[in-house]
Image: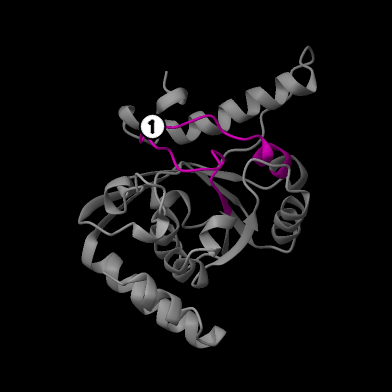
Amino acid sequence: MISSRTAKLIGYLPKGMLKYVSKKVVDRYLNKYANITVLGKDNIENIKEPVIFIGNHLSNSDGLVLQKVLRDKNVTFVAGMKLSNNPLTNIGMSIVKSITIKPNSADKEAINAIIKTVKAGESIFIFPEGTRSRTGSMIEAKKGVILIAKVTKVPVIPVGIWGTEKLMPINKEGDMGAEKFYHADVYVSFGKPISMPEKNPDEDKQQYNDRALEYFMKSIATLLPEEYRGVYGD
């Protein structure tokens, strides 16, 4: 396993070399430890980009697996600030296009950057829960994704991912740099494109946004084994 010291040294490489070396490192570990199965790939083969991908969040390896699976798509990932501040996770960040967002806040600058990216024709991937689930089951999502979907008016593709919580488990002490790869079967399931539901005449803005978010998140949940659905289970 790559050490934090080695990861820090890699981080000092020039940008072009950093991306090349980081990609080699990440691919090596994924090929060694992750047995990846992709389900529903026909749902994204002929999509007209841009789209908004939304998925559940279990591990810091989620983005690494997803960038490998979506390598032929033009996807920018929305990631928390902590990832870019850690030498190990920064290696993964260097191989994907990303927009950094402040967790648990109305980060208007990041939201505007996301909307601008989509309007420029690039797809984005958002983890609406905003953080990794510590239990493996889905947790309450943040409402930022609804604003983005409303403004951009592009299709939304739900994605269910599981097994990554075993591939790279969350460190119990909260030390991302101490997280390691383990052999695991990983599954990525793509759903059919969806869009914002129609607003009911008797709904106020809050009720409509809540219902739309529930619809989005349950679209992810239906792609997951029952034990992963959490608050969005039936």
x and y percent of residue 58 in the render? 40, 44
Q: Is residue 140 left or right of residue 35?
A: right
Taking the magenta stretch, the answer to whether it contains residue 141 is yes
Q: Which residues are drawn in magenta? A: 125-148
Q: Position of residue 216 (x, y in %)?
A: 56, 33
Q: Nearer the viewer, residue 71 or 93?
A: 93
Res. 48 visible in picture: no
At 42% across and 18% down in the image, what residue appears? 234
State the residue at coordinates (74%, 18%).
Answer: 200
Return the residue nearer the eye: 154 or 125.
125
Q: State the image quarter where residue 68 is shown.
A: bottom left
Q: Is residue 211 left or right of residue 82?
A: right
Residue depicted at 72% across the width and 54% down the height:
110
Closest to the observer, 92 or 225: 92
- SS state under label 1: loop
* Residue 62 point in image, percent of width and height: 41, 53
Q: Is residue 177 above or below residue 2?
A: above
Question: Can you say whether 204 is above or below 149 in the image?
Answer: above
Expressed as whole percent of the image width and height from the top left, the position of residue 221 reads 43, 32
